[in-house]
Amino acid sequence: MKSKRSVYDSPWRGLLYLMPGLITYALFILIPVVQTILLGMMDWSGLGKKTFIGFQNYLELFSDPIFFQSLANNAVLVFYIMILPTLLGLVLASIIELNDIAFRKLFEVMFFMPYILSLVVVGVIWRWIYNPAFGVLNTVLSAVGLSSLSRAWLGESQTALAAVGFTGTWVHYGFAMVVFLAGYSRISPSLYDAVALDGGGKWHEFRHVALPSLTNEMVVVGVYLFINSLKTFDLVYVMTKGGPGYSTNVLSLYVFRNAFQYNRNGYAAALAVTLMVIIFGITLLVTRARRRYEQA
Amino acid sequence: MSRHRVAFSFSRIITIAVLLLFLVISVAPFLLVWSAAFKTKADLVTNVLGPPKTFHFENIRKAWIQGRFGTYYKNSILVVVPVVAGTILLSLANAYAFAYFRIPAKELLFGIILLGMTIPMEVVIIQLYYHLLNLGLLNTLKGLVLAQIGMGIPFGTFFLRGTLKEIPRSLIDAAEIDGAGTFAILTRILIPMSGSAIMTLIVFFFTWTWNEFLLTLVVIHSDSLRTLPVGMAFFQGKYTGDTPLIAMGAALMTLPIIILYIVLQKYVISGITAGALKE
């Protein structure tokens, strides 16, 4: 009897299944990405010839105050889009879980709702909320006698970035909460029983059972939201277009502007590649640290 | 003992108050926008927070026809349907090949595809623009659809490969002995067994494509081809002074999605979180 042959051994048949997807991916994503990486070392207005200039675009980056301002703004957004939603999500999930709240499904569904919407429509809604003349926020403030606090939230450089950032918090905290709730559902009830025997209360349950069990969720949510804050584009484009001045300008918007408004394609590519390197770096670092932590 | 009980119920009141506060924060913006959508400009100036005194339904017609929301809806559907179908079909074929077939340089090819999950759109768009221009696909829905499929394939492949690998090999071997070909095994055994994974992906790619902004902003230039998010961004610039009309635009965009979300919440929450966290 001949050795068993499987229909899955023929490489040609496998490649046949692979080709359509691989070609689409290569043609529309991979090739443009490789071209962009190369373009980072060139000077090109979009028309005419590309000139090779080595790392000049990257050197220019380091003396570009708008680049640093954008980077700093992205860092502020990390607070509003990563740190704040993660903390709020953890607190809300813990409150719901450890107190046996009735209608928990209602809270889960409603808190998650902002996250399913297009950020464009979220930006449009919040632009109205922040509107100085007949916006919701100023109306509420004057209704409770705090009209002295009302201002053009998106029009003043002191408040614009925080106003955009808070919108990001609104979008993401329910998402974080849902992930933590899923994490809670994986904790075995017997772990709580051990704490109950020790006479611990809710705080003990949170501190000694939930918190250690949720580290994986915290890392996953944290990394995802960190990357999201670095890639913020839609909200800023719709709410402020980076203004007033450059007070809400972010890296993505700066890439977009250089490429499609200032015709500085090489520089835009260098910026985009820098963004990609930061994202890859963080992802790699966290994956490594996690692997080490899990082995220990 | 009784002191403990008082403290307990007190903390419970605080807990519920906090949850209700966040419930208001999450939901109020929607209610305010939907009510503003039915006011006139004059109404809105004097009555920001209350419900509309009379409902001005003509805003619907104005946003749908004059504001072209009808066109944007049509374009969004023309993009979302082929993107979701195409991404899932191609990802399924890819996942099948990676999960079961003997392919040269399999690990390398899989690694290259996985790379796509972390590539930010910003890096793709600059050259994609000129690439589509050369292919004659710039400013066409076809170009937009193909680029979105390309962008979705990495996650689709990764996710479905995991699903297919969990199916017991013995089932496939048995079918092979019965003389079934690879295509028959895929369509008669593997796809029916991956129903919930495919449903999760449909929801994920649907919301992702429906909400996509940056790529569409770069690829599409004619107003008649804009999808909802890009249409909305231009619409709000054009009717800056007319807040009720903008609110109606926002209402037309949010209400159907939210109804769909509430009906399918189980799939939506699991689909979106799985997609986001790439688990």
Image (cartoon, helix red, strand yellow):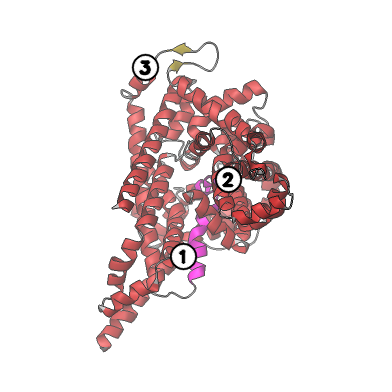
The answer to whether marks 1 and 3 mark residues whose Cβ atoms lie closer than 8 Å is: no
Q: Residue at x 58, y 45 (%)?
A: B99
Q: x%, y% of residue B221?
A: 63, 30
Q: Amino acid at mark 1?
A: Leu
Query: Which class describes the residues within 10 Å of circle 2: few (<14), some (14-19), or many (20+)?
Result: some
Residue lying farthest to the front in this orientation: A1
Determine the CA span between mark 2 and mark 1.
Answer: 44 Å
Which residue is denoted by mark 3 in the rendering? A56
Q: Is label 2 on the same chain as label 1?
A: yes
Q: Amino acid at mark 3?
A: Gln
Q: x%, y% of residue B252?
A: 64, 52
Q: Amino acid at mark 2?
A: Ala
Q: Which mark is residue B188?
A: none
Query: Which class describes the residues within 10 Å of circle 3: few (<14), some (14-19), or many (20+)?
Result: some
| Parent chain of label 3 | A
Q: Nearest to the eye among marks 3 and 2: give it.
A: 2
Q: Label 1's element?
A: helix
| Parent chain of label 2 | B
Determine the CA span between mark 3 and mark 2.
Answer: 44 Å
Which residue is denoted by mark 1 in the rendering? B23
Q: Label 3's element?
A: helix
Which residue is denoted by mark 2 in the rendering? B99
Is residue A10 visible in the rendered structure shown here? yes
- Left or right: B146, with A214 as reference point: right
Determine the CA span between mark 1 and mark 3.
Answer: 51 Å
The answer to whether marks 2 and 1 mark residues whose Cβ atoms lie closer than 8 Å is: no
Question: Is residue A115 within the magenta segment?
Answer: yes
Q: Residue at x 41, y 52 (%)?
A: A169
Q: Which segment did they paint magenta? A: A104-125
